[in-house]
Image: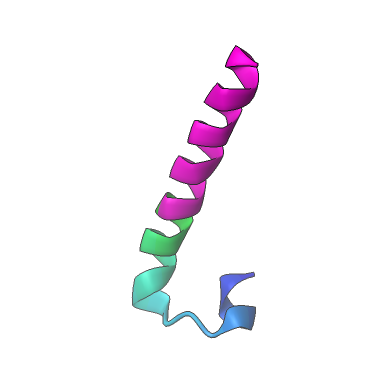
Amino acid sequence: MLRKYGYPPDKQEKATQTVLEQAEVLSEGWAVA
């Protein structure tokens, strides 16, 4: 998926980690709401 957007392989892991962290924060917000 990330390759489609032109991420270099060495940045894919960091990008994936960022997405997971954002999803975690969002899901915490939904759990509170």
Residue depicted at 59% across the width and 14% down the height = 32
Instruction: Classify residue 2 as left or right of residue 10.
Output: right
Which secondary structure class fits the magenta region best?
Answer: helix
- Looking at the image, which is closer to me, 29 or 12? 29
Residue depicted at 51% across the width and 34% down the height = 24
Residue depicted at 48% across the width and 80% down the height = 7
Residue 1 position, x and y percent, is: 64, 69
- 33 above or below 6? above
- Looking at the image, which is closer to me, 29 or 14? 29
Q: Is residue 23 magenta?
A: yes
Residue extending farthest to the front is: 33
How many dots with numbers?
0
- 31 above or below 21? above
- Tell me the magenta residue range: 18-33
Residue 5 position, x and y percent, is: 60, 80
- 31 above or below 13? above
Colour mode of the rendering? rainbow
Residue 25 position, x and y percent, is: 49, 33
Q: Quadrant of residue 28?
A: top right
Q: Quadrant of the C terminus?
A: top right
Residue 8 position, x and y percent, is: 42, 82
Q: Is residue 19 magenta?
A: yes
- 30 above or below 17? above
Residue depicted at 57% across the width and 79% down the height = 3
